[in-house]
Structures are given as structure tokens and as C-alpha cells.
Image (cartoon, rainbow, N blue to C red):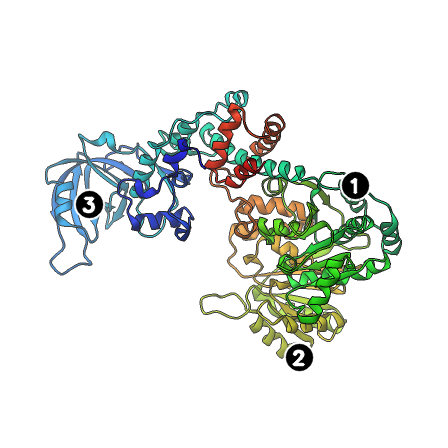
Amino acid sequence: MRPPVLDPLFSSIRSLTGVGPKIARMLAKVLDVDMATGEPWLIDLLQLMPHSSIDRRNRVTVADAQEGAIATLELTVGRHQPPLPGKRNIPYRVFAHDTSGSITLVFFHAQASWLQGQLPVGGQVIVSGKVECFNGQPSMVHPDHITTVADSAALPLVEPVYPSTAGLSAKTVARAMLEALTHIPALPEWQEKHFHQREDFPAYAQALARIHAPQDPADIALTTPARRRLAYDELLAGQLALALVRLKTRRLSGRALPLHGTCTNRLRDSLPFRLTQGQEQAIDEISTDLAAPERMLRLLQGDVGAGKTVVALLAMAQAAESEGQSALMAPTEVLARQHFATIAPLAEKAGLQTALLTGREKGCERERILASLQQGQIHIIIGTHALIQEGVEFRNLALAIIDEQHRFGVHQRLQLTGKGNAPDMLVMTATPIPRTLVLTAFGDMDVSRLTEKPAGRKPIKTATLPAERMEELLTRISHALSAGEKLYWICPLVEESENSDLTAATERFEVLTQRFGDMVGLVHGKMPAAQKDVAMADFKTGKTRLLVATTVVEVGVDVPDASIIVIEHSERFGLAQLHQLRGRVGRSDKPSSCTLLYKEPLSATARARLNVMRETEDGFVIAEEDLRLRGEGDLLGTKQSGVPGFHLADIEAHRDLLETARRDARLILEQDSELESPRGQALRLLLYLFRRDDAIRLLRAG
């Protein structure tokens, strides 16, 4: 169904000169294309951006060439010195000179006949590469380029440098890229005319040519009109696809779930705490959405402990007032059970029936839950992926809630909503997401934010400590245990591995047990579910008071009287994860502390991360810093989330373009919802170029 005009860009990279099966496999690795599903296309190659460039315009004499710098030299070849027969480890040397001095060209495992052809004795040649010094004599090991003076015009003066993999030469990538540029067809302009002129954007093909065949090292900078144009293309394709999803989803006729107050008032009266202003505002926004006939698509962002669950519960109570059922899907059984433990007693006081469905509910119990759900006796069901399995049927699913959406793929979100007739949707996350990423990942949703913590919560005191001072920390822990405190001790691995120096949870458990006896418990992701439950229950009841754990406790574990957390090898964790882990304490009115144990030497980024953790508890500030420190690629775990990892756009450098792209996309669809106009038809090509085929299918489906 792809327009034929794009066929040249969607032909295999093996159509390029010199790209056989072996090179194609290596290029696929660099381009992050799975060969099991097909070979990379030319468009994949053209969307590979250089990360730097080599400037070969530095034409100097041998005497002026600086050690460690790239130099381009015009030389006369003196003599060849091949290695002695059988001495494969000795390099082949070629001695050359200019009027200022001499230089040795060094080649390992070289073919003598090829070198004699490239560097004939007495010949005038141009060589370019890194100049090094060996025994006081200038040398160049494996020059990047060798050409005759007559052919020197073919030497690339500014050479883009691309990500690579073992065995793939830079020359091979450059040659393939330059040939791929010749295959770009004439395409209509999809950018809005005035914006295009204001930003001084080149045409699409011209922008790619400026990046892949630069005339100046500055041409590949993120801030050039060429790179900004390509970045905007990518951002606009993403925002247009999200806007199409939003438009089509909203067109599926939703239904009004007005606020009657029967269940919601009873629920409010039974709450043992006062709602924060932020919670009240989020509840109002969600309630208004539910009461409207259009489908709700809303993201509820709340920092650790900000009280998202009670906001979701009031939304589910409003759905129940219109005889609608609600489903809350969580990514782990631990989190699902935690939600159930919080929600079920409160829901019961409002007269609502709650059930739990995970992989553990089997046989008669599962059949009973499924029958009650189908008959409408269950108002709220909480569960894991088990909710989207075959055989799970609702009488009237009106509200679908997904917690920690970035742990699920988009298709799982669709599977859950498919259990009802266009139900309203609420997505919750405790991972504070910077606004720029909210736009890229959840641009099809309205957003509510909870920024305050519930009343009475005290700040968490955070300190950093080098691993060398472990004994000092253990003494402090001994005092804390004597005073009746509960502590988490987080390790990055389950068991020790030969190729890692990270402390394993099982090993740390044994060390701490020798010191503190049966007060120490252990929980990690490889344990059977029942064993995990016992370990968590022992910690909750106080049978154990020092819980050694992996990041399995990162989300959804609620032990309000735990007041101390130690995170070992904290330098190996991302900021968002450190923040999530720290949020396991500080969940009551007790003073709490977090100790970030680290191992020297610290990288500059790791030091910056730990400093941020010490200075702030604001998850949104932390998320913005995380984005700044490590880019958007892994902030939400791109692979499993369906969050786009960008090829051409850089979130930090092109932040201003993202807002514009979002506005542009919405305006386009307001004026041309089917993309039928000349610009609309051109934008369809843009969607194909950035693999937004799903959005095109939505257009076709009407």
C-alpha cells in the first residue's frame, strides 16, 4: 500500500554497490534492524546520523604535522620494507618524505602487491590519517586514505563519522551512504510554507545531503538548518501519528458516566485522610472527562507516594454509579496485590465489590471470579496481564486503568480496552516524566499531575557514602535495628557473576545474616511468587526488619514503617530508578533516610546523578535532570514501551521543535482530518518515511 514514489528508499541496502550479505548483517547491527524480520532499507541507512566528523583539510608538511592529529600530506614514496618471510607479526613499512622531513607509513598484515600499486617508489601521493611518533620518528599506521596527486580531488575533505561495529570499515559505510543519497526521489514538501521559510530549512533531500556529504565540520551540528529540518520531520511524524490515534479513538463513540455521588460520596466519607489540592484537581478533571460523551484518554502523573491510587478509586466509583465496571492493570503481581490491599477495603465501605486476578488465581477460584465479572457482580477488578487473556469477559467495562504504562506495549493497552465497548482510559505512572517525553510518548492524552505529597509526610534525608566506609554504616544500622527501625538494603544483582563486580543480593544477605541473624530477610525477582509473599509478609509484620532486595521492590511495595533504605552500587542506577527506590521509605510521619553507597572511581555523570539525589526529592526535577544527563533513549526503557527512540531528533537540542510539531499536527487534523489536501498527501509520505504505517492504517480504516 506504500506509494510507489517511495520505492527507491524502501529497497534493500543490498542493492548498493559492494554491500553483500556479510556487510548487510553488520550494517543491520549498527542500524538496530532485526535481520529475522527483513534486511535494512536505504531509508534506514539515510536516517543514521554521524556523531562527529574528521577534517582532512589540514594540508601540512611532515615537519608541521602534530602528533595525535589527523593530517593530509603530499609525499614522495622512497622505499618499501616488507617483513621477512614467516614474520607475520612484523609490519610492512613504506618510507616517504616531503621537503620538510620523512615519515614511515606502517601496515599490518598487508598485501605487498596492493601496497606497491598504491605507493609506487618515486610516486607522488596524498595520504591522510593520524600522525604518531615512534622512536622520535613521525609515522602513520594504516592511513585512512591514499590517492595520487592527480586524483586528490576525490579525497573527502570533511568526513562524517558514524556509529560502527567490529569488521565494518568507515569507508564502507561512507561509500554506501553517498550512493544511497543518489536514490532519494523527488518528493513534495510536507512542511508548512511560512514555517519552512522562517526556519531557513533546506528541502528534504538537500538536508540529508548536507549531513552525509558535509563541506564543513559545522554542517553536521545539531543546530544547523539541515539537522533541525530532519529533526522536525521526525518529531512531526510522531506527533501526527499520536494525533491521529487520538482523533480516531475519540471518534469511537464513548458514553457519559455522570457523577451521581451515590458511591463517590460514601467513599469520600470513609477516607481516613484528607485529599491534597492536587488530588482534588485531578479528580475534578477526570470526573469531567468521564461525564462527557467522548472517550477519556488521560495520563495521571504522580510522584512516588503522591496518592494516585485514591484518585483512580474515585474514578472507578463514578463509573460504578452508571453501572459500569472498571479494570486496573498493573505490570507486576506485587504491584497488583498492593493495589488490591489498598483499594478493596475502601471500595467495600462504598458498597463496591473488588476482585484480584493474576497468574496465581487458578481452577475453581479463577472460574468463580470470571463468572462474577461476566455477570456484573464485580465492580472493580485489579490484575496483571491475566486481565487481557482469552476468557476474561466483562458485563460492562466502562473504565480501563493502566498503571506504569511504560512497562506495557501499546498493543496491551488496546487489548484491555478491547474488552469493553470503547471504555474510558486512564493511564497512571509513578515515573515522573519530563514534559518533552510526555509529548513524545503520551501526546495523544490529556495530562493530570500530582506534585504534592500527602499531608504529614516528612522529607527523606539523603546521604552518599563510599563503599570503603561500610563498617561505619553497619554500626549505624545496628543502632537502628536496636531502636526498632525497619530497613531496605538494595543490591543490583540476584547472584554473584564472574564477569561482574556488582554486589549480589544473595551474597549480601549471607554477610548481613552473619552479623544480624534472623532479623535479615531476602526478596528478589527469581524467587517463586509464594516465597516472595512470605518474605514481604515477614518484613511487614516485623518478623524480619532488614530486607535485602533487588529492584523488585522498586514499584508498589508499601511498608509505611520502613524508614531507612541503603542502595548499594548506587552509581550503577539511573536517576529515575534511584528516585523510585528511595520512595519505598518516607511513607509515614517518621523521619526517614536514604544512603547511596558508591564505589570509586565515579564517572562525572554518576557523580552528577548522586548530587541531584542529595539535593532534591522532586521527581519532576529529577526526571528533567535524568533526561539532560543521559538523553531520552533509555529514560522510560524505550524497547518495551513503544516510546520512540529518535534517529534524527535530539530531545535536548530540539526541544523547541517538539512543541511546534504538536501544535502543527493538531492544526493539520483540524483542517484536514483525512489528510486529503496536497499537504495532507505529502504528510502521508512523511508518515511512511518514519514507519508510522499504523497511523496510515487508521486513516484507511476511517
From the top left corner, tell me how far across and down residue 109 is, in percent.
20, 54
Within 10 angstroms of label 2, few (less than 14), some, or many (20 or more) residues?
A: few
Eyeballing the image, is 463 above or below 168?
below
Give the mark toward the camera: 1 or 3. 1
Instruction: Please indicate whether residue 204 sits to the left or right of residue 576 in the image.
Output: left
Q: Quadrant of residue 173?
A: top left
Which amino acid, by three-letter code, is at mark 1?
Ala
Give the mark toward the camera: 3 or 2. 2
Query: In this figure, which residue is indicated by the disc labeled 1?
Result: 291
Q: Are marks 1 and 3 in contact (CB under 8 Å)?
A: no
Query: In this figure, which residue is indicated by the disc labeled 3?
Result: 104
SS at circle 1: helix
Query: In this figure, which residue is indicated by the disc labeled 2?
Result: 517
Instruction: Please indicate whether residue 533 sits to the left or right of residue 212 in the image.
Output: right
Give the mark toward the camera: 1 or 2. 1
Q: Earlier in the sequence, mark 3 or mark 2?
A: 3
Residue located at (36% from left, 47% from top): 27
Image quarter of the C terminus: top right
From the top left corner, tell me how far across and down residue 163 is, in percent.
39, 45
Task: Measure the C-alpha gap from mark 3 to mark 2.
Answer: 68 Å
Which amino acid, by three-letter code, is at mark 2?
Gly
Within 10 angstroms of label 1, few (less than 14), some, or many (20 or more) residues?
A: some
Q: Earlier in the sequence, mark 1 or mark 2?
A: 1
Residue located at (59% from left, 27% from top): 672
Instruction: Please indicate whether residue 227 sits to the left or right of residue 643 in the image.
Output: left
**Frontmost residue, 672 versus 657:** 672
Residue 301's label in the rendered image is: none
Q: Are marks 3 and 2 in contact (CB under 8 Å)?
A: no
